[in-house]
Image (cartoon, rainbow, N blue to C red):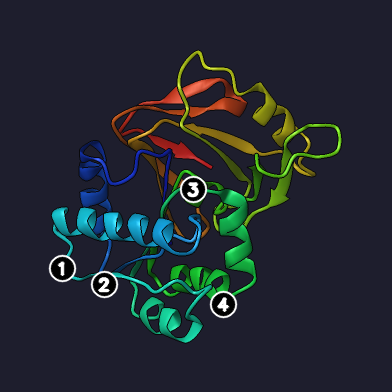
Amino acid sequence: MTVCLQGGGEFSPGCRPMDEQLLGYVDGPVVVTALAGAPGREYRTATDNGVRHFRACGAGEVIGAPDVREDTDGALRVLRTARLLVLPGGSPARLLTALRTSPVGQHVLDLVADGGAVMGASAGAMVLGAWTVLPERPGPDGELGLEEGLGLVPGVAVVPHWRTGASRSDWLRALAGAPAPLTVLGLPEESGLLVQGAKAGIASAVGQHATRVVSEDRDVPVGEELSL
Protein backbone atom coordinates (compact mmCIF):
# COMPACT_ATOMS: atom_id res chain seq x y z
CA MET A 1 0.00 0.00 0.00
CA THR A 2 1.03 3.62 -0.52
CA VAL A 3 -0.70 6.35 1.48
CA CYS A 4 0.52 9.90 2.00
CA LEU A 5 -0.95 11.71 5.02
CA GLN A 6 -0.37 15.47 4.85
CA GLY A 7 -0.96 18.18 7.42
CA GLY A 8 -2.41 20.84 5.14
CA GLY A 9 -1.30 23.73 2.97
CA GLU A 10 -1.74 21.31 0.10
CA PHE A 11 -0.95 22.34 -3.46
CA SER A 12 1.46 25.08 -2.30
CA PRO A 13 4.99 25.30 -3.74
CA GLY A 14 6.36 23.88 -0.47
CA CYS A 15 4.41 20.66 -1.05
CA ARG A 16 5.94 20.08 -4.46
CA PRO A 17 8.98 18.01 -3.35
CA MET A 18 6.96 15.50 -1.32
CA ASP A 19 4.30 15.23 -4.01
CA GLU A 20 6.97 14.65 -6.65
CA GLN A 21 8.34 11.91 -4.38
CA LEU A 22 4.85 10.40 -4.08
CA LEU A 23 4.45 10.39 -7.87
CA GLY A 24 7.47 8.09 -8.04
CA TYR A 25 5.25 5.33 -6.65
CA VAL A 26 2.36 5.98 -9.06
CA ASP A 27 1.95 4.06 -12.32
CA GLY A 28 -1.02 5.84 -13.88
CA PRO A 29 -3.51 8.72 -13.71
CA VAL A 30 -3.87 11.09 -10.77
CA VAL A 31 -7.49 11.88 -9.88
CA VAL A 32 -8.48 14.74 -7.56
CA THR A 33 -11.85 14.81 -5.76
CA ALA A 34 -12.36 17.57 -3.18
CA LEU A 35 -15.22 15.97 -1.26
CA ALA A 36 -14.30 17.79 1.95
CA GLY A 37 -15.55 20.94 0.22
CA ALA A 38 -19.17 21.96 -0.25
CA PRO A 39 -20.76 21.01 -3.59
CA GLY A 40 -20.50 23.63 -6.29
CA ARG A 41 -17.85 26.34 -6.45
CA GLU A 42 -15.93 25.15 -3.38
CA TYR A 43 -15.61 21.62 -4.76
CA ARG A 44 -14.60 22.80 -8.22
CA THR A 45 -12.04 25.33 -6.96
CA ALA A 46 -10.24 22.86 -4.69
CA THR A 47 -10.32 20.13 -7.33
CA ASP A 48 -8.97 22.47 -10.02
CA ASN A 49 -6.19 23.63 -7.69
CA GLY A 50 -5.15 20.02 -7.18
CA VAL A 51 -5.14 19.31 -10.90
CA ARG A 52 -2.88 22.32 -11.61
CA HIS A 53 -0.54 21.38 -8.77
CA PHE A 54 0.01 17.77 -9.80
CA ARG A 55 0.49 18.77 -13.43
CA ALA A 56 3.19 21.19 -12.24
CA CYS A 57 4.74 18.30 -10.29
CA GLY A 58 5.14 16.38 -13.55
CA ALA A 59 2.28 13.90 -13.37
CA GLY A 60 1.54 12.51 -16.82
CA GLU A 61 -2.26 12.53 -16.55
CA VAL A 62 -4.22 14.47 -13.94
CA ILE A 63 -8.03 14.55 -13.90
CA GLY A 64 -10.56 16.34 -11.72
CA ALA A 65 -13.43 13.99 -10.96
CA PRO A 66 -17.03 15.19 -11.08
CA ASP A 67 -18.58 15.57 -7.64
CA VAL A 68 -20.05 12.17 -6.71
CA ARG A 69 -22.76 13.97 -4.72
CA GLU A 70 -24.03 15.52 -7.97
CA ASP A 71 -23.02 13.01 -10.65
CA THR A 72 -22.48 9.53 -9.23
CA ASP A 73 -21.98 7.70 -12.52
CA GLY A 74 -19.68 10.34 -14.00
CA ALA A 75 -17.59 10.52 -10.84
CA LEU A 76 -17.16 6.76 -10.62
CA ARG A 77 -16.10 6.51 -14.28
CA VAL A 78 -13.24 8.90 -13.56
CA LEU A 79 -12.37 7.54 -10.12
CA ARG A 80 -11.96 4.02 -11.50
CA THR A 81 -9.09 5.27 -13.70
CA ALA A 82 -7.07 6.55 -10.73
CA ARG A 83 -3.75 5.15 -9.62
CA LEU A 84 -3.33 8.05 -7.21
CA LEU A 85 -6.47 9.46 -5.60
CA VAL A 86 -6.11 12.90 -3.99
CA LEU A 87 -8.42 14.00 -1.15
CA PRO A 88 -7.78 17.68 -0.26
CA GLY A 89 -8.71 19.37 3.00
CA GLY A 90 -11.91 21.02 4.18
CA SER A 91 -14.54 19.55 6.47
CA PRO A 92 -13.72 16.08 7.83
CA ALA A 93 -17.39 15.49 8.67
CA ARG A 94 -18.46 16.38 5.12
CA LEU A 95 -15.75 14.19 3.62
CA LEU A 96 -16.50 11.21 5.85
CA THR A 97 -20.21 11.49 5.03
CA ALA A 98 -19.48 11.61 1.28
CA LEU A 99 -17.21 8.57 1.48
CA ARG A 100 -19.71 6.53 3.49
CA THR A 101 -22.87 7.44 1.59
CA SER A 102 -21.37 6.80 -1.85
CA PRO A 103 -19.22 4.04 -3.38
CA VAL A 104 -16.13 6.28 -3.08
CA GLY A 105 -15.20 5.04 0.40
CA GLN A 106 -15.01 1.45 -0.77
CA HIS A 107 -13.19 2.59 -3.89
CA VAL A 108 -10.46 4.14 -1.74
CA LEU A 109 -9.93 0.83 0.05
CA ASP A 110 -10.02 -1.16 -3.19
CA LEU A 111 -7.54 1.18 -4.92
CA VAL A 112 -4.92 0.73 -2.21
CA ALA A 113 -5.51 -3.04 -2.07
CA ASP A 114 -4.86 -3.10 -5.84
CA GLY A 115 -1.50 -1.36 -5.47
CA GLY A 116 -2.69 2.18 -6.06
CA ALA A 117 -1.98 5.20 -3.88
CA VAL A 118 -4.04 7.70 -1.88
CA MET A 119 -3.03 11.17 -0.70
CA GLY A 120 -5.09 12.90 1.95
CA ALA A 121 -4.37 16.42 3.21
CA SER A 122 -5.78 17.88 6.45
CA ALA A 123 -9.36 16.54 6.50
CA GLY A 124 -8.32 14.06 3.81
CA ALA A 125 -5.60 12.69 6.09
CA MET A 126 -7.83 12.71 9.16
CA VAL A 127 -10.49 10.38 7.73
CA LEU A 128 -7.94 7.81 6.51
CA GLY A 129 -6.93 6.87 10.06
CA ALA A 130 -8.66 4.67 12.61
CA TRP A 131 -10.46 7.54 14.36
CA THR A 132 -10.90 11.22 13.62
CA VAL A 133 -11.95 14.32 15.50
CA LEU A 134 -14.98 16.07 13.98
CA PRO A 135 -14.73 19.71 15.08
CA GLU A 136 -18.03 20.53 13.34
CA ARG A 137 -19.95 18.02 15.47
CA PRO A 138 -19.38 18.79 19.15
CA GLY A 139 -21.15 16.65 21.73
CA PRO A 140 -23.83 17.92 24.13
CA ASP A 141 -21.14 18.82 26.67
CA GLY A 142 -19.28 20.94 24.12
CA GLU A 143 -16.45 18.42 23.70
CA LEU A 144 -15.29 17.71 20.17
CA GLY A 145 -16.94 14.85 18.35
CA LEU A 146 -15.03 11.67 17.57
CA GLU A 147 -15.86 9.19 14.83
CA GLU A 148 -14.38 6.08 13.32
CA GLY A 149 -12.40 6.74 10.14
CA LEU A 150 -11.83 4.54 7.11
CA GLY A 151 -9.02 2.71 8.91
CA LEU A 152 -6.78 2.70 5.85
CA VAL A 153 -3.89 3.40 8.22
CA PRO A 154 -4.84 1.31 11.28
CA GLY A 155 -4.24 2.48 14.82
CA VAL A 156 -3.49 6.06 13.75
CA ALA A 157 -5.19 9.43 14.24
CA VAL A 158 -4.09 12.66 12.56
CA VAL A 159 -4.00 16.16 14.02
CA PRO A 160 -3.34 18.44 11.00
CA HIS A 161 -1.87 21.97 10.87
CA TRP A 162 0.42 21.03 13.77
CA ARG A 163 2.64 23.79 15.16
CA THR A 164 5.15 23.38 17.97
CA GLY A 165 3.88 25.11 21.08
CA ALA A 166 0.31 25.43 19.82
CA SER A 167 -2.30 23.89 22.09
CA ARG A 168 -4.58 21.26 20.58
CA SER A 169 -5.64 19.98 23.99
CA ASP A 170 -9.32 19.74 22.98
CA TRP A 171 -8.41 17.51 20.02
CA LEU A 172 -6.12 15.36 22.15
CA ARG A 173 -8.77 14.94 24.86
CA ALA A 174 -11.24 13.77 22.23
CA LEU A 175 -8.76 11.27 20.75
CA ALA A 176 -7.97 9.95 24.23
CA GLY A 177 -11.58 8.78 24.34
CA ALA A 178 -11.14 6.35 21.43
CA PRO A 179 -11.95 2.71 22.30
CA ALA A 180 -8.38 1.56 21.59
CA PRO A 181 -4.97 3.23 22.01
CA LEU A 182 -3.94 5.38 19.04
CA THR A 183 -0.70 6.60 17.55
CA VAL A 184 -1.53 10.31 17.36
CA LEU A 185 0.37 12.14 14.61
CA GLY A 186 0.81 15.92 14.57
CA LEU A 187 1.36 16.85 10.93
CA PRO A 188 2.52 20.39 10.09
CA GLU A 189 1.45 22.11 6.89
CA GLU A 190 3.51 21.27 3.77
CA SER A 191 4.62 18.10 5.56
CA GLY A 192 3.42 14.59 6.10
CA LEU A 193 4.01 10.90 6.44
CA LEU A 194 4.47 8.48 3.55
CA VAL A 195 3.07 5.12 4.67
CA GLN A 196 4.02 1.98 2.78
CA GLY A 197 3.91 -1.77 3.20
CA ALA A 198 1.27 -4.48 3.07
CA LYS A 199 0.17 -3.77 6.65
CA ALA A 200 0.88 -0.03 6.75
CA GLY A 201 3.81 -0.72 9.04
CA ILE A 202 6.54 1.40 7.42
CA ALA A 203 6.34 5.18 7.27
CA SER A 204 8.75 8.02 6.60
CA ALA A 205 8.47 11.72 7.34
CA VAL A 206 8.30 13.84 4.17
CA GLY A 207 7.90 17.49 3.28
CA GLN A 208 9.23 20.59 5.00
CA HIS A 209 8.94 19.74 8.70
CA ALA A 210 9.23 16.83 11.13
CA THR A 211 6.24 14.68 12.01
CA ARG A 212 5.25 14.91 15.66
CA VAL A 213 4.32 11.60 17.28
CA VAL A 214 2.17 13.20 19.96
CA SER A 215 1.37 9.94 21.72
CA GLU A 216 5.11 9.31 22.23
CA ASP A 217 6.17 12.95 22.75
CA ARG A 218 8.81 12.87 20.01
CA ASP A 219 9.58 14.17 16.53
CA VAL A 220 10.48 12.17 13.43
CA PRO A 221 12.76 14.35 11.25
CA VAL A 222 12.16 14.49 7.51
CA GLY A 223 13.66 11.46 5.82
CA GLU A 224 13.60 9.27 8.91
CA GLU A 225 11.33 6.25 9.36
CA LEU A 226 8.63 5.53 11.89
CA SER A 227 7.25 2.11 12.77
CA LEU A 228 3.45 2.26 13.13
Secondary structure beneath dot 3 equals: loop
First-in-chain label (2 vs 3): 2
Dot 1 or dot 2: first in sequence order is 2
Kindly tell me whether residue 44 is visible in this rendering.
yes
Asked if the residue at tag 2 contacts the one at tag 1, i.e. Cβ–Cβ closer than 8 Å, the answer is: yes
Tell me the distance, in whole angstroms, between the alpha carbons under discs 2 and 3: 23 Å
Question: CA gap, disc 4 to disc 2?
Answer: 19 Å
Instruction: Give the mark, 1 or 3, whose residue is nearer the N terminus.
Output: 1
Q: Which residue is mark 4?
A: 103
Q: Secondary structure at mark 1?
A: loop
The residue at the far top in this view is 165
Q: Earlier in the sequence, mark 3 or mark 4?
A: 3
Q: Provide the residue designation for mark 2.
A: 29
Q: Is residue 191 left or right of residue 156?
A: left
Give the secondary structure at mark 4.
loop
Task: List x then y, in percent, for residue 72.
Answer: 50, 81
Residue holding disc 1: 60
Please, is residue 64 above or below residue 47 in the view? Answer: below
Residue type at mark 1: give it.
Gly
- Disc 3 crowd rating (10 Å Cα; few below 14, some 14-19, many 20+) is many
Alpha carbon distance from label 3 to label 4:
20 Å
Point out residue 6 in the picture as x, y percentages from the top left corner: 41, 43
* Residue wearing tag 3: 90
Q: Nearer the viewer, residue 74 or 22?
A: 74
- Mark whose residue sits in front, 4 or 2: 4
